[in-house]
Structure formats: structure tokens, C-alpha cells
Image (cartoon, helix red, strand yellow):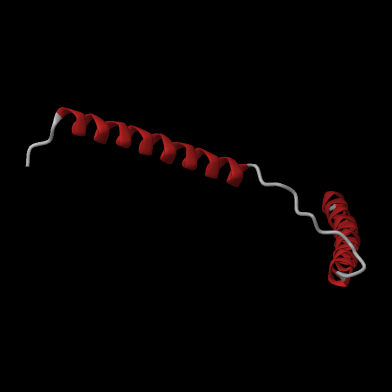
Amino acid sequence: MKWSRSNRLTRAIVRLWLRRVMIFALFSTLGVALVPRPALAACGTLDLGACVDAAEYSFYYGLAGMGWAVDRTLLQLAYQLDQFR
């Protein structure tokens, strides 16, 4: 089957258009993946789970902070005892 010149030109235009669409889709997907939007999670009257999650996160964050303070103190004490030896 022999392709006419206009048919080949149309196929080339379609290929170029498809390539541009695919490149646009790739870059827009990469842009969304690399720059995520912040999640809109807040306490509400109908969503009590978000409030519980926020309180639990704050509790464990504070617990981890206190644990790190104790660990830091013990590490400093061990370092000072090692220096006295």
C-alpha cells in the first residue's frame, strides 16, 4: 500500500502532536510528584478522628522530645566520665 504525500504529512503531524502531549503529561506528572500540596486535615465537628490523630501525634512528639533530652544528658555524662579517666 502506497501512502500519499498528504497522508504521510498528516501522520507526521499526529506523531508530533502526540509526542508533545506525552511530554506535557510527563512534565506535569513530575511537577505534581515533586511539589506536593499540603494535606487539608483539620479538626472538625464531623471528623473527630483528625482531632484524635493530632492529639496523639502531639503526645508522642512530646514523649520523643523528653526521651531525647534524657538520652542527651546521659550521653553528655558518659562523655564527661570518659574524659576524667
- Identify the residue shown where x is 58% and y is 40%: 31
Of residues 61 and 52, the one nearer the viewer is 52
Q: Report x, y in % for residue 53.
A: 84, 68
Q: Is residue 37 left or right of residue 56?
A: left
How many marks can you see? 0
- Identify the residue shown where x is 54% and y is 40%: 28
Q: Report x, y in % for residue 19.
A: 37, 36
Q: Choose top left, top right, bottom left or bottom right for residue 56.
A: bottom right
Q: In this view, does 31 lie to the left or right of 17?
A: right
Of all residues shown, which one is farthest toward the left?
1
Q: Report x, y in % for residue 69.
A: 90, 57
Q: Choose top left, top right, bottom left or bottom right for residue 21.
A: top left
- Give the quarter of the figure containing the N terminus: top left
* Rendered view: 10 above or below 47: above
Q: In this view, does 2 lie to the left or right of 30?
A: left
- Identify the residue shown where x is 20% and y is 34%: 7
Q: Choose top left, top right, bottom left or bottom right for residue 14.
A: top left
